[in-house]
Image (cartoon, rainbow, N blue to C red):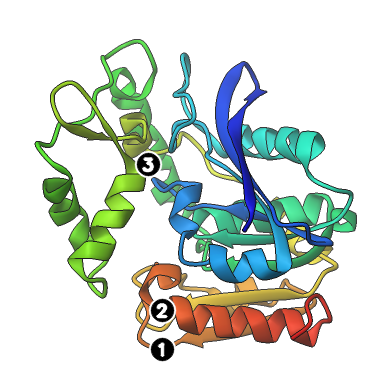
């Protein structure tokens, strides 16, 4: 039975929620959750991972139980700062990474910045096409033209209130078409909080306004090329988030294994947890990170 340390750590003046599963293992793994998600939603992976790793995870700013920002707006550099703070405070010298969606993208960049720290990298999707500069200009202009919606303190931030967890689950169900309603309700429990008037999503609604800028795609590609550990990238065969230039993206990883999972969408760790466990088991066994 693992001992789970659950508390908050400080990064950039914010209290961020974290959990450490102390399983008494030699290897450690850092989990990166997706956009508008939380680290708790790796719940189907915890039993397998706990057999082989000490598990480290935290909720990004404005996600899960972590604080919302008090000024400015969100951007990915903040997340990298928080990852570095968390790693420096809690993680051992070397560790493994498993990230989903935005977490896969953040994890891959971190692995490129600190390749000497990373033993293996697994990305459950998490990559974007290079955007047309004209479209990027229009997106940035639209963001600036609606600045009153995008900056903290200009408008009150408030999530919609739902009367029950069941109502939340029905709202979440289209995101998880392959899951039965009970499992969706379980996920809704982790992604919501009880209030005096009902239930609300935990995530900061400011995230829905998007980001003023993205990582440089050229720097990102250089970081991918710097990764020196075995890398596994998995895409759901039926994902709705396929980059137009997926082959070009994958060409920048030097030690890549690529798999498409059948009967799975973008949230493959929920759609097909047993298949994912099998793929992870094979990958870690192959590279000698775990034993039978």
x and y, in percent, of residue 101 in the image: 49, 59
Residue ID for mark 3 = 139
For label 1, count other residues whose C-alpha is less than 10 Å away and answer few (under 14), some (14-19) or many (20+).
few
Residue at the spot 54% in from the left edge and 68% down from the top edge: 124
x and y, in percent, of residue 247 in the image: 58, 80
Can you say which quadrant of the picture contains the C terminus?
Answer: bottom right
Q: Against 109, is 152 above or below?
A: above
Say which of marks 1 and 2 sits in front: 2
- What number is the disc on residue 272? 2
On the rendered structure, is 57 left or right of 198? right
Please tell me whether mark 3 sits on a helix, a strand or a loop: helix
Confirm or deny contact between disc 3 and disc 1 (CB under 8 A).
Answer: no
Picture mark count: 3
Of 106 and 203, nearer the camera is 203
Residue ID for mark 1 = 262
x and y, in percent, of residue 193 in the image: 30, 34
Sequence-earlier tag: 2 or 3: 3
For label 3, count other residues whose C-alpha is less than 10 Å away and answer few (under 14), some (14-19) or many (20+).
some
Q: Against 233, is 158 above or below?
A: above
On the rendered structure, is 183 left or right of 136? left
x and y, in percent, of residue 70 in the image: 46, 14
Sequence-earlier tag: 1 or 2: 1
Residue at the spot 39% in from the left edge and 19% down from the top edge: 151
Say which of marks 2 and 3 sits in front: 2
- Per the model, the C-alpha gap separating discs 1 and 2 is 9 Å
Please tell me whether mark 2 sits on a helix, a strand or a loop: loop
Q: Quadrant of residue 103?
A: bottom right
Confirm or deny contact between disc 1 and disc 2 (CB under 8 A).
Answer: yes
């Amino acid at each position: 039975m693992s001992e789970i340390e659950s508390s908050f750590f400080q990064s950039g003046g914010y209290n961020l929620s974290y959990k450490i599963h102390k399983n008494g293992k030699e290897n450690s793994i850092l989990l990166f959750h997706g956009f508008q998600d939380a680290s708790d939603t790796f719940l189907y992976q915890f039993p397998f991972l706990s057999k082989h790793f000490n598990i480290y995870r935290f909720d990004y700013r404005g996600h899960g139980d972590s604080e919302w920002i008090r000024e400015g707006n969100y951007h990915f550099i903040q997340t990298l700062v928080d990852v570095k703070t968390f790693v420096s405070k809690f993680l051992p010298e070397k560790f493994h990474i498993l990230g989903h969606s935005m977490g896969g993208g953040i994890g891959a960049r971190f692995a490129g910045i600190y390749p000497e720290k990373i033993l293996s990298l697994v990305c459950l999707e998490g990559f974007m096409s290079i955007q047309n500069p004209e479209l990027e200009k229009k997106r940035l202009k639209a963001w600036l033209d609606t600045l009153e919606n995008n900056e903290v303190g200009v408008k009150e931030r408030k999530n919609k209130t739902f009367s029950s967890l069941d109502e939340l689950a029905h709202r979440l169900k289209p995101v998880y078409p392959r899951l039965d309603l009970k499992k969706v309700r379980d996920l809704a429990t982790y992604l919501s909080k009880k209030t005096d008037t009902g239930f609300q999503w935990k995530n900061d609604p400011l995230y829905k306004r998007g980001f003023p800028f993205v990582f440089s795609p050229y720097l990102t590609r250089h970081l991918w090329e710097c990764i020196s550990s075995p890398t596994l990238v998995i895409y759901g065969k039926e994902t709705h988030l396929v980059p137009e230039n997926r082959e070009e993206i994958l060409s920048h990883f030097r030690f890549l294994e690529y798999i498409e999972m059948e009967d799975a969408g973008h949230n493959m760790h929920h759609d097909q947890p047993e298949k994912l466990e099998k793929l992870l088991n094979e990958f870690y066994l192959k590279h000698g990170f775990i034993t039978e």
